[in-house]
Image (cartoon, coloured by chain):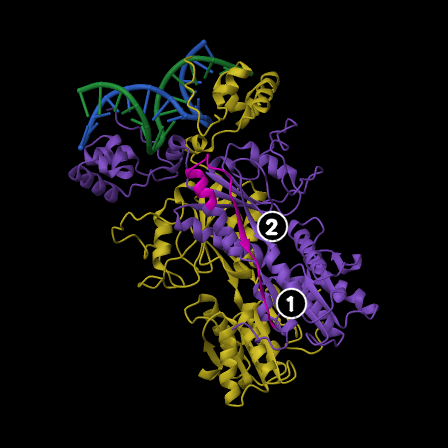
Chain colours: A purple, B yellow, C green, D blue
Amino acid sequence: MPPRKDKPVNGKRLPSIQDVAIAADVSTATVSRVLNNPNLVSPETAEKVRKAVVQLGYKPNLFAQGLMTRKSRVLGIALPDIHGEFYSELLRGADAEARRRGYHILVGTEARKAEAQPLTPHNLPPGALAPGSPELPERSNLAFGLVDGLAIMITEPNELLWREARELALPVVVLDVEIAEPGVDCIMVDNGPGTKEATEHLLAALPGDKLYFVGGPRENFDTQRRGETFVETLRDAGIRARKDQLAFGRYSVEWGYLWAGTLLKANALRGIGVLAGNDEIALGVLQAAQDARIKVPEELRIVGYDDTRLASLVRPSLSSVRVPMAEVGAAAISTLIDRIAEPERPATIVRLPTKLVVRESSDKNAASGGF
Amino acid sequence: MPPRKDKPVNGKRLPSIQDVAIAADVSTATVSRVLNNPNLVSPETAEKVRKAVVQLGYKPNLFAQGLMTRKSRVLGIALPDIHGEFYSELLRGADAEARRRGYHILVGTEARKAEAQPLTPHNLPPGALAPGSPELPERSNLAFGLVDGLAIMITEPNELLWREARELALPVVVLDVEIAEPGVDCIMVDNGPGTKEATEHLLAALPGDKLYFVGGPRENFDTQRRGETFVETLRDAGIRARKDQLAFGRYSVEWGYLWAGTLLKANALRGIGVLAGNDEIALGVLQAAQDARIKVPEELRIVGYDDTRLASLVRPSLSSVRVPMAEVGAAAISTLIDRIAEPERPATIVRLPTKLVVRESSDKNAASGGF
DNA sequence: ATGAAAGCGCTAACAA
DNA sequence: TTGTTAGCGCTTTCAT
């Protein structure tokens, strides 16, 4: 066995499997076995090797390992933007599940704009998104090559992101949009139950024509689905929603405040009920009401969405539809790992339920605060 | 040249540098050069190669690349807990800076408990933390081997985490604690200015003996430093702080509410000023005041800390000391990348300033809201 | 300017 | 049970 050439890197050379093999007086194969398939090695040899491993402080080189096994135990997760409470919860759930199963998480923010060609949200026919244009070899923004799988969240039509992900020969799970492609699992928030519950909750106190849905961006899938369910629930109650009962804007306090302002001018903010697209919008409406001395919930009932920390911290506390973001993150990772283990299994769709949490902003008898 | 063995992985085999070389009718070395040192190759050859790269959709194998170069362009970041607005801001700043400089981020939550041996926060003598005990080869919780550098945030004494990081032959930058170790850069939040400013702001309206500091955990470095500066500022104003003017608990609304409750019982909540250890604590105090019909800011002045989104969204809006978390994250990444490029340069300490943002909770004339 | 060849550190047949 | 050997896909001398 020729002696290893000593090419020190960065000052100190880390011990390689060779060093361990020499120290333990065995072959590298045996060392490898001790680390990966201990049952193939006699207890005595294994012990010898382990001692050498500890003594030298040997850590397998993950690049070499990855080169051989094509596995890194790293999962990529691409979010539209890691801003705010919302995504941080998702990331938290994802990270917890990942570490539980011995994986690591590589985060990637998807900063690019949505592309010209919109992606149809529902039941996309397989192959419809097949690579068409010969893409330029631009440096990809996710370290795709290093990850064993990829979870991508698509909240708005974004063909480019999707295509890029699909061209990879990588297990992919998609969050927030249903893709009917074999082998692609989806994790969805089922906005239905929560939205229905919230709308009915408001209907219990107010006539259907006094109810408003104030959503986020019109392109946002969740806003779309929440708006639809809102309309359906009204219809089920015998009310056909007017166009002005649905509004779309942004997921921000400002937009909620603005929207409330326009109703205020028309003297129409009193005596109505509002289902907001998220908690920030709801808060904007709430603040506008407070500034106009309109009593919440007596004169104006408000229900937010997402049930972020904000909802339970403001006064009056905000009724809100709880969206289990941490669970979404965890489910994504869990599903991804399962698919890696079993690449050919049929695509699954996980649907996580939403649920109304009633607080003061829609019911003066609701328990205050949140603690 | 013997033909490559075709061992398809996961269905499809990705093109290797060999495939490109064959397609372009050059050697693999040339392909490599085109990708890494284009100036070493004639324009015509380069063009040929590029065409083949695009046509085959070739992406270099990052494991093989890492094995050779010992670089992955991935940076690890270990946070105590990725909960809440606070860390999500940090992560956001870090991710933005990382992608700006062509790196990716691997997140790792440090879930382990603080160890028995506490880590002295300031001016630790070099070598004091040298590896002493022969650690068990437990599976490390960060994919250390895959990252080019590591940013770790240490908010409380935690020798184990530190030692583990130091044993790696990895560039390390430490957040939130000063480590006097050669080659280790530190990113610090300079609590001084903001705390001083906030305390003086309160002193302008109230006598020093009516001021209280309600901190987070006693072990938390930031809470410690904020408390100290609070005391110093009072001293500079000629007031010697009583013990009961400093309180320590947790970084939560509940703790703030609780603390205010005890003062309330003693009928001592009116007419005082409170500097809270973070915004949640401040909010707890605020809510207690509201529940007790104590007017803020007229009868009770409150200043929070961190200036999270919460501060500008509650009513009355919360004065708060702004902590530039996104900048902290960005600085950590930036410093880390600089050190990777220049491993031997002297250790630097980056200090990011804090600054008081006055809102309604401490000054009734302050502009409302935040938008 | 280009190619041949030697590994980087590891795992996995295949032998023994 | 263990060792030998052949690569994984890439970069990088060293020749040419």
Up-down relation of residue B344 to residue B203 (above or below): above
Question: Toward the viewer: A219 or D2?
Answer: A219
Of the residues shown, which amino acid type is indicated by label 2? Asp
**Magenta stretch bounds:** A335-359
- What percent of the width, then of the height, locates residue A271? 75, 72
Q: Residues within 10 Å of mark 1 (few under 14, many from 20)?
A: some
Quadrant where the N terminus of chain B lies? top left
Camera sees residue B328: no
Of the residues shown, which amino acid type is indicated by label 1? His
Badge 1 marks a residue whose secondary structure is: helix
Given the image, what chain letter belongs to the residue carrying mark 1?
A: A
Numbered mark located on residue A64 in the image = none
Q: Is residue A85 magenta?
A: no
- What percent of the width, then of the height, locates residue B9? 44, 28
A353 sits to left or right of A249: left
Q: How many marks?
A: 2
Instruction: Name which of mark 1 and mark 2 comes first in the sequence.
Output: 2
Question: Toward the viewer: B141 or A288?
Answer: A288
Q: Is residue A352 magenta?
A: yes
A323 sits to left or right of A99: right
- What percent of the width, then of the height, locates residue A327? 50, 54
Numbered mark located on residue A81 in the image = 2
Camera sees residue A275: yes
Given the image, what chain letter belongs to the residue carrying mark 2?
A: A
Q: Are marks 1 and 2 in contact (CB under 8 Å)?
A: no
Question: Toward the viewer: B270 or A229?
Answer: A229
Residue highlighted by disc 1: A201
Question: Toward the viewer: B264 or A16?
Answer: B264
